[in-house]
Amino acid sequence: MKFGGTSIGDGARMKHVALLAKEYREKGNEIVLVTSALSGVTDALLKNAKDASETGKTSSVKEFIADLTKQHHQAAHDAINKSNIVEKVTGEIDSRIEELEKALIGICYLGELTVRSIDYISSYGERLAAPILCGSLNSIGVKSHTFTGGEAGIITTDEYGNARPLEKTYFLVKERMEPLLQDGIPVVTGFIGENEAGIITTLGRGGSDFSASIIGAAISADEIWLWKEVNGILTTDPKIVPEARTIPFISYIEAMELSYFGAKVLHPKAIEPAIKHGIPVRVKNTFDPDFPGTIVVKDLKQSRDIVKAVTVIKNVALINISGAGMVGTIGVAARVFTTLANAGVNIIMISQGSSEANISLVVDENHLDKAVRGIKAEFKNGIIKEVTHDRKICVVAVVGAGMANTPGVAGRVFGALGKAAVNVIMISQGSSQHNISFVVSEDGAKKAVQVLHREFGLEKEK
Ligand code: ADP
Ligand code: ASP
Ligand code: MG
């Protein structure tokens, strides 16, 4: 069971989570708890690390450290009702925060923030939350110890900020976690692992979903449960369309496509370990535990609803590469993609028309500069005339396995957008036919999602 940031947002919520876990344990389940950071803490850590490297102001670091200490002490007091345990936990918090402070002050003096230090700093959110949750469990009579991802056995690649578990992880986690399950509920920090040299890595933003899935797969869990503050996976982000509904059943593939195409509810890699080991994933609401939520499973008969969900990816940018010289010239695309791969650019969408006079790409916004620089350098005296870009765009996608071999879906998508006067900038549909994605201006994205949600009747009870 993984609990997200909002689910453990403060001490009272952590106590609720501890009681919930205890209740499920008493019903005969063996549980590993994976915890996120308290909501907002990871963002705050990242912001303060960046500020420290840019401004070098140690006074700001001290202020931040004082706030963070206060927040976590308060949570410990509210989550734990035994003073000796509160004392032990706040002691642990203090010594961790002291290490964090030293690291941030170091960054102030160095004026430098490496990918490795970003992972180190951002790991503190989970590392401060875990002792509180563990203390809360202890205080209601449940045996529990905390583990960092690395201590639990999650050993990863060196790809800081986006690390992947090495194969031995599955063996190590099993060896370390299984013996503890009969006796109590181990608490593992989500989001973080360590590389083979023992240095902390992170699995990417929202990575505690991935941690839970890795651990669930390793111990051959019956199910992997991701507890959030929403009623499961919904037909779209309820922040954009309040009428969005819970999708009760969804296939692994659909859930993956949804998360690739921006549904923040799941980390994009969270489904992989579950698929490999055939373990169902449940997404449930911490604040309404009796509501069944969503279950993600392997096989699903093609359902009546062709489109299951609409998603939007923000913080992306469009690159247009054009030049008449590209027509009929073999190897242009290969050079573009090799250049971008070498520059470490993540490509989200690709399109090339058959006129071959231009290639359009969507990339992560923070990769835009290096992407454009790389392409210009590669083609400095040749066939590419112009490289333009646009930051003010979003990718919208409609997702559903039922779309495969169903004629007319694209017609409905673009017809509805046309009627609503939403301008479509670029279109892509993979041959898996499980999604249609397209680019619109940032201003048009919300409307596009709302229009399509209505067009496919997703707000209606099924
Ligand atoms: P946690 O921190 O518990 O993992 P997240 O904040 O990462 O939770 O994910 C839940 C959020 O995802 C919701 O608050 C919701 O706004 C957003 N979201 C986006 N798309 C969807 C969707 N299709 N279904 C449910 N939630 C979604
Ligand atoms: N705390 C991490 C983040 O905010 C991981 C997570 O919440 O899943 O990205
Ligand atoms: Mg998340």
Image (tube, rainbow, N blue to C red):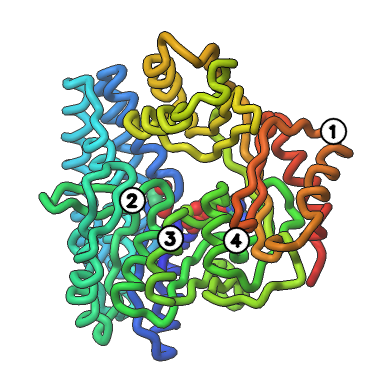
Q: Which mark is residue 230?
A: 4
Which of the two discs, 1 and 4, labels the residue nearer the N terminus?
A: 4
Alpha-carbon neighbours of circle 3 within 10 Å: few (<14), some, or many (≥20)? Answer: many
What residue is pinned by disc 3?
Answer: 270
What is the spatial separation of the Cα atoms under label 1 and label 3, in whole angstroms? 36 Å
In the displayed structure image, the side of residue 299 where residue 336 appears, left or right:
left
Q: Residue reaching furthest right?
A: 419
Q: CA distance from mark 4 to mark 3?
A: 17 Å
Dot 3: element? loop
Mark 2 vs mark 4: which is more N-terminal? 2
- What is the count of numbered marks? 4
Disc 4 marks a residue whose amino acid type is Val
User: Mark 2 to mark 4: distance in Å?
Assistant: 23 Å
Q: How far apart are the two marked residues, 1 and 4, measured between alpha carbons?
A: 31 Å
Looking at the image, is mark 2 or mark 4 nearer the viewer?
2
Whether 248 is drawn above or below 408: the answer is: below
From the Cβ of disc 2, is ligand 2 less than 8 Å away? yes
Q: Which mark is residue 421?
A: 1
Q: Which residue is identified by label 2?
A: 203
Q: Quadrant of residue 143?
A: bottom left
Question: Where's residue 440, x and y in %?
Answer: 69, 33
